[in-house]
Image: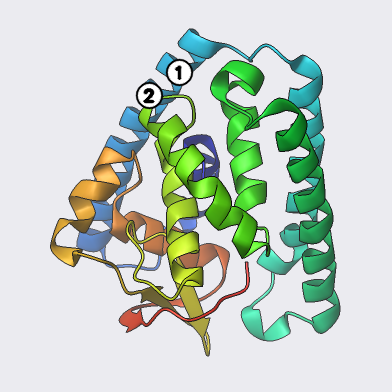
Amino acid sequence: MHHRILIQMRNLLIVGALCVVTAAFGQDIASQQAAWEKAAEAHHDALLKQWGEGSDSALREKLQAMYVRDQGARRFMMTLPQAQWTDALARQQRDTDVALTLQLKAMVRTHGWPTFQLVGIDGSSQAMLILNHSADHAWQSEMLPQLERLAVNGEIDGADLAMFVDKTLIAARKPQRYGMTFKFVDGRMQMYAVEDPAHLAARRERMMLPPLVVYKHMLAEIYHLRETDEIAQPDPMKP
């Protein structure tokens, strides 16, 4: 998930979310959120100054249209409690993900992975979001080494990669690395088990991710779930 998307989530959710917690806890969330947002914005601005909007405007516009379609298939579900998610809505989302996966595969075959240099910061993040939502786990695993190299070289966003790494690990029934993936059970959210929990906060900070307490609170609000400290064990999951 791109920094800008997380900030947009904050704009929609965090104000209301803070109203339902204690004052002390709310202040702690707000201060951590503010510090992360400041660092994320500075990072984004530096990348934008370096890469601009990328070299391929047509490809960037195509990714933007794909992103709009991806979000359109999810937007209504995100306004409903999980108990009100219908089979028809879930099927629409799956069908959209399949179609967008095929489009992204064709794009990658022709142009390579959409990097900052090719499509700019937002375009690259939109491509990663579509890959995250894909049900083609074999292709995701195949792409992972290349994407890790691109992230190390500063050609794609580390925060986007973190989400992708975690989903790939969970799909392989392994503990996640960055704490980005949660399981929804009976109106509660459970974080999937993480490797080396003692150093989770440091790994999240290195990838420019929000503090875990802030991220959990944002997810709970957007999906209408109760926050818990419960841990789920990895199992095959749907995107």
Three-letter amino acid code at the position of disc 2: His
Picture coordinates of residue 239 (x, y %)? 62, 66
Residue tagged by mark 1? 47
Mark 1, secondary structure of its residue: helix
Label disc, if present, on residue 67 of the rendered structure: none
Q: Quadrant of residue 209?
A: top left
Picture coordinates of residue 8 (x, y %)? 55, 41
Q: Is residue 195 left or right of residue 58?
A: left
Q: How is the image coloured?
A: rainbow
Would residue 18 be visible to someone looking at this image? no
Picture coordinates of residue 24 (x, y %)? 20, 60
Residue tagged by mark 2? 43
Q: Is residue 58 above or below residue 220?
A: above
Picture coordinates of residue 1 (x, y %)? 51, 46
Measuring 34% from the left and 47% from the top, which residue is drawn there?
210
Q: Is residue 87 above or below residue 103?
A: below
Q: Is residue 30 left or right of residue 138?
A: left
Measuring 48% from the left and 24% from the top, which residue is drawn there?
155
Q: Is residue 112 left or right of residue 150?
A: right
Measuring 48% from the left and 58% from the top, which residue is drawn there?
16
Nearest the camera: 196 or 72? 196
Q: Is residue 73 above or below residue 11?
A: below
Q: CA distance from mark 1 to mark 2?
A: 6 Å
